[in-house]
Structures are given as C-alpha cells and as structure tokens.
Image (cartoon, rainbow, N blue to C red):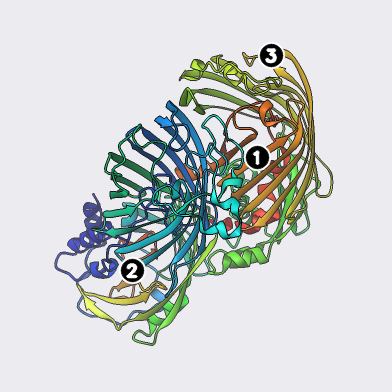
Amino acid sequence: MGSRMRLAAMSFLAGLGTAPALVDPALAETQPAEPQLAWHLNGLGLPGLIDMPSALSPPDAQFTGQIAGFRNTLRYSLTWTASDRLTAAFRYALLFDLRGVPGGKTVYPSIFDRSFSLHYRLLDEGPMWPALALGLNDVAGTGIYGGEYLVATRTLSPRLRLTGGIGWGRLGSYGGFANPLGVLGDGFDSRSYARPEEGGTLTWGSWFHGPAALFGGVEYQLTDALSLTAEYSSDAYQREAGTAFAWKTPVNLGLTWAAGPGFSLSAQAIHGGALGVQADWTFNPKTPRAGSGYDAAGPMLTAAPVPGGDLARDLADRGLRLLGQRQDGALLEVDLANDRYVIAAQALGRAARVLVRDAPKGVARFRIILSEAGMPVTQVTLDRAALLASEFFVDGSALSRADARISDATAGLPRLPGAFPAADVWLGPYLKPVLFDPDAPLRADLGLALNGRVDLAPGLVLAASLQQRVLGTLDQQSRVSNSTLPHVRSDAWLYDKAALTLPTATIAWYARPGPDLYARITGGLLEPMFAGLSGELLWKPQASRLALGLELDALAQRGYDQALDLRDYRVVTGFATAYYAFGSGVTARLDLGRYLAGDQGATLTLGRRLDNGWEIAVFATRTDVSAAEFGEGSFDKGFSLTIPLSLVGGQPRREVTTAVIHAVGRDGGAMPDVPGRLYDTIRADQQDALDATWGRFWK
Amino acid sequence: MRRVLAALILALAGCDTAQHLRPPRPAAFQPGPGAAVMFAAVPARDRAAPIAVEGSRGGIVTWRTADNVSFSFDRGVLVATRGLGPDLMAGEAAPTLAALARPGGPDYALRKRYLTGDNHDLMLTLTCRMAAPVVEDGAQVLTESCVLPDGQRVENRFAFGQGGDLLRSAQWIGPDLGMALFAALGG
C-alpha cells in the first residue's frame, strides 16, 4: 500500500462528501519509514560497493542484469542468487588497450573476456558481529578479473553501512603485503597469471596466492532514492593503468539513484581517472509482478450437479482435454491432457471444480489421470465431499492434499471417440540469439515459426516446426571453424545462413513398459543439425528423488539449409543419466556416455528449480577430447535458463522457454538436442512436483 | 479515473438517511435480496467494477465481475478473491462475524492464506479487535482493527443500514493488494 491506496481512499472519502470515511487514509497507509539502505552491486555484478565486494547477499533467487562501463572498459554481468547464501555472476567484458599480464609490456588493442564469480555469505550479521563472505572472481577464465576475498560488512544505522576486507590476486594488487597465508606454505607467496588467449580451466592453483591487500568502504543512504558509496580499492588496475585510463588514486566514489522498481543507475569516479556509469536491473522470479498469476476465477463448487453440464466441453473451457472417461459405481475416472497449466496441481484443481459441478449425484470420488503425449503418468483420487469442505477453508490447501491419493498411472482409460487424432497448429514469433561471438557479442534473428502437432493415437505424436527469418544478423557470422574434431557444433554459423528452415520434424512414440518406467522412441529431424532415431528408457517412481535414464541415438548430420538433406557424418551417441533432487529445488544430473563427435565422457549439471517453473542450471562436460583439441575454453560449459511463459504475462500458459548458453560453442562434449526427453516430459505431473506446489490446487 | 469510479460507487450505493438505528443483525449480513449487484473496487489494481452473484453454498456467496474476478463472502465478510494476482486464497470469517455480533470484546486471531509467486502457501495471522459501533452518515459502522505479524495496522469497516443489511464495507485483501471496497446496490 502506498500513495495509490491513499489516493483511492481519499476519493472514496470525497464521494461521501462531508460524511466520515469508511477507510481512514492514515490507517490504510503504512507509517513512512526511515530511508532504508539500498542494495548495491559492484561493477562485477557482485554484492559490493563500486569495484570492491561487500559481505551481503541479494535475496534468494534474485536476478540482476548489469551494464557497467568506464573508459576502455565495458562489462555485461548477469547475477543470480542461487541459494540464500550463494551468489553467482557471469560476466562478459569488452576491454580495450589492456596489458596481457599485470604490468606487462604487450598491450592488446581489444580483448573480449568471459568470467564467472562465486560469492558465499559465511555468516549473517548479528547483534555484535558483522556479516562475513568469501568470494572467488573469475574461477575458470583468463584470470583478468582473477581475485579472491574475505570481507566483512556491518550496518551501523539504517542509513550507514561499513565494509572492510582482505583481497588476493587483482584485489591484492594495490597496497599489497606478504600473503598471511604464506604460513601455510611457501607456495602461497607467489601467483602466476595467464595470458588472455589462455584459460578456460579452473584456476584453483592460484586462488588465495600472491600478495594480499586490504580494502574497505562505506555506503550511505542520502534520501529514499539516492545513496552514496565511497571505497578504498585494493585493485591497482595493473593491466589497465596508464594504457586504458589514468589511475590516480585508490579511492572510488559513487552516487546511485534508485530510478524505479528494480532499476538503478550509478555515476562513479573511478580512481580519479575515469567517469563510470552503471545500470542495474533486478528482479526476483520468486516474486513476479503478477504474484501467483491473474488466472481467471474457476467456477465455484456446487453442492448438487449443475444442470446442462457437459464434462468434455467444460474441461475444454479450462484448457483440459478429456481423453478417456469411465464410471465404476461411485468412482468417476477421467484421463486428461493438460494444455494450459504449467503447474499440474492447478490443472487438477480446475478439473476437480468441473467434476464436482458436472458429475452425477451418485459419484462420491474422482480419479484424475494426468497424461502427457497420451501416455498416462499420474493418477490422483479426490473425494467429492472433502473438496466441498476445503474450497473456502483457511487450511483448505493442506486439507485437500491430505484427502488426495496420488499414485503411478500405468494404464490409461478407454479412449473417448474423437479424442484422437487431435491436431494443433500455432503460429508465433521466435527469437534466436547468438551470444558472446568474439566478433559481435550479441546477434539475433527474429522470425515467424509455424508449429504443428498431431496426437495420432495415445502415445503417438507427429510434430514439426517451420521457421522463416524476418530480420536478424545471424547470417553475418563468419567464424570458420578451426576444429580438428568432426564439426558437430562449430559449423553452427553455417546453419544460420538459411532464412526458411525446418528445425524439427519428428514422429514420437511414448509408452509405459511397467510401473515407474517410461519409454520413448523418436525419429526424424530431431534438431537443426542432426536427424535420426532416438530411444530412451526412464525409471522415475512418483515421489523418488532419484531417476535413472538410458538413451541411445543413431544420428546423421543434417545439411546446412536445415531442409531434408543429410551430410556424410554419422554417429551413434548414448547416455546413462542419473537425476537427483536434493530438496529446496536444488537438482543434479550426471550424464555418462558418448557424445556427438564420438568422444566419451561425462556431463555434470547443477540446477535450482523454483516451484513456479523457473530454473537455472550450470553444466560442464569433460570428455576424452584434450583441452588443445577442444580449442578455446578447453572444455564445454555453460548455463541454461528456463522461464515459464505464464510468469511473463501472468496468464496461465503451459509453455516454457529454455535458453542454453555455452561459454564457447565447440565440438567436444556436445550432446544431441532430442525433443521430448522423458524426464522433462513427466516430471511436473509426478507426486514430488504436485506436493511442492499443491497450494495452487485452489488457485 | 479512480476518483471518478469511487465517486460513482458511492453515488450508486446511495446514502442512507434514516435516523432510527438498530444494532446489526448477524443473520442479515448478506446484502439484501434487492442487491444482486454490488460494486467492488480494488485501488491497488486500479479497478472498479460491478459484481454479480455467481452462486452460494453453505452461507458463502461468490460474486464475479464480467471478466472473471471473483470475491467470496461469508455473510458479508470477505473470505476469498480470485483473478487479482496475489489473491486471498482463503480467510477465516467466524471470528469477525462473532465480533460483529458482540463488538467491543477482546482481541481475536484471524487467519488468512495466500499463495506466493513460487506456489507455496503463506499463512498470515492477524490480531484483531472490533470497536463498538458508531453512527456515521446514518449508517452504523463497525471497525475491525488488525495488526499484521510485521506490525503494520489495517482496518476493516462494515457499514450497516437500519435493517441490519450491510451497505458498504472496506476490507483488507492482503499485503500486496491492500484494501477492497464494496458497496451494495439497491439495498
């Protein structure tokens, strides 16, 4: 409640003329608070001051996109608070007139540098002690931003915060002294530096090595929207000073303006030699603007069946397709395809509302089978009287869950005539970005995609996508691959030349070979670069944290035009995969197998999945391809981001969009991108996902 | 726009000028039979719209706008909203109804359930007190003052006509949406 509320309450008053108000504006308003200390991220996207870190962490799951720049330095950072204590930042920097090594002679006219940082809050601020955090900058890159720190932050008043710490590497380059960790061994006394063209592997051998230095600073909240930052920096800018800009003083000054919700702008005096600007855009996917969504109210429950109800029609009105139906005495079973809700618990709740209204009086229980691609996944049994009792009950969420029985559904119901075949065609825009090409950090195509899908029979699905580029710059790429491996991914730029393409065209068959087992066979144009046949078997009990999968793919490389022609390269890939959910949305996945270039190895993926469908994961692959054979980056690594489209507009939608960003797209450790993989197809319908999101049942 | 809407609501709700007042009758907390339409305003959403009865069950009446925003009331006390975003998933009415019948009594707890942006139940317990009725503009107004767990204070107000019918109310939906204003038509 803010000024809007007051305005509205005043209007209400005005309408009453001189009569006393129904709403007292003073009470509808929270007391004006003291200015609260703003959040600051430093120019590397980490909690901090201007260049130096602080010991705080942004709220759990918070995202920040940042652009920070000053003379000859431009950084784009993406920061994500992966857990309450762990913050990670990925950064892409364009650096000009930079020395290859600190204090070195060779000056590079320009360098495009990628780096990745981790920041961990060890200790929360307490009544007598400060917050304490440990951080690693550039853990697997060229080391340009390589530096480690231990930092303490103390809030002295609601307006004032102090920070002090000790840094190594880049953060130990000004005012440095002999490394106190030298007592642990002589090795800590010196530090080696990589040249910009090297890197890509973990630099742990130099962490906390070399001279150390102290840094510190202060943050002061001037007004609600303005805050001041001053710091004593232990970064001597040894690669930049004198070439990229004139370093004059260790002191940096900043003024930050909270320009709008989640958006701030800063102006900075950088070491007395450059004027810096920084823009931060912050949002938290746990608290989207639409809250839990603007979903239209479902129909209220009725004690008696509503005359004129038509189950198939009323379910279809809620985006639920009735595939099969059977009544056995007081039990009514329905088999549903959920076309609308990204959270299956809501699909169940909407179906329950329709069933209570439409089912004949003698029906006391409902069994809802959730099917994917016509393959039954989960069955949920609900009690009609319990639903009526819990609809408006303050504990109705827990109560409705307690009354529900969830189990594996290995068999569907007799199909309704007309349920198959079911066709769906939709036309929509597509955006295909290519990030971090050294020649141009951001390229993209925008076009139209015509997608079609036909559910031919239960479990049998025909699907295809046709794309027409409307505008874009992907066809300007000219990075001829120097890879000595088969060019399974490094010719991606050639695949981006064609304007009209058929990225996928597949026929897939899904089945349940037994309890907790799922199977898939997919054939056709599986992805833009490979066609063939893919088979998969998955074991995933309903509430199990562990799932195991096997996949085998016989593939042929597709022509660059992404039409129907094939190139000569053939490969068989295969993977044994273990998936594990640790709780609190933390997930791990380990793939062992044979990759597209015929190399063998493993991929480890660590992810965080929010219970609204947001997911971010980092992955790394090591195979028997050597770092030299792999080329730039040494091994394949990157991250993926999955966003449910329902959270973008706040309206219910089943679709999610996933972006996978490889640090460098090379040929080693490359997996085929087969559509409709089983784990992602069934996971949201299973008991663990339903339990985590059951609150949405009555949404 | 908001000012106009709010003024419209009040114009439509009319002002009860009757001089003879009786204590509110809990049984008559529903808007009367002539009030099949109410106006609802949610200032935080910049919305005001007529709402019509969708149906009732077990004393709870659900009202709905043309674009499927719904408000459910247990004898006049708001117990659920849908379609507004950070909706009130469910709220207790019984403590408020008891206090409306016997205002001026001791504090009582009022529980409300919300759904977070990542689909978790969020329970809020308010500590409330119902003040003795006062006569304002010919209506008998009862004010329920509540304190949230974070110390923030909110007030729900119920204005009853001489027949004991609820004419208008201002009720707190939740932390994100703030107050909703309801005015019965033709009551």
The tag earlier along the polypeptide, 1 or 3, is 3
Q: CB under 8 Å between callouts 2 and 1? A: no
Mark 1, Cα crowd under 10 Å, few <14 / some 14-19 / many 20+, is some
Q: Which residue is mark 1?
A: A620
**What is the chain identity of the residue bearing mark 2?**
A
Q: Secondary structure at mark 1?
A: strand
For the N terminus of chain A, give its image quadrant.
bottom left
Q: Which residue is mark 3?
A: A564
Q: Which residue is mark 2?
A: A156
Q: CA distance from mark 1 to mark 3?
A: 32 Å
Left or right, residue B110 beside residue A209: left
Q: Is residue A699 above or below residue A550?
A: below
Estimate the x, y position of residue A636 in percent, counting from the top left.
64, 34
Q: Secondary structure at mark 2?
A: strand
**What is the chain identity of the residue bearing mark 3?**
A
Q: Residue furthest bottom?
A: B105
Estimate the x, y position of residue B169 in percent, counting from the top left.
32, 68
Left or right, residue A121 beside residue A488: left
Q: Is residue B183 visible?
A: no
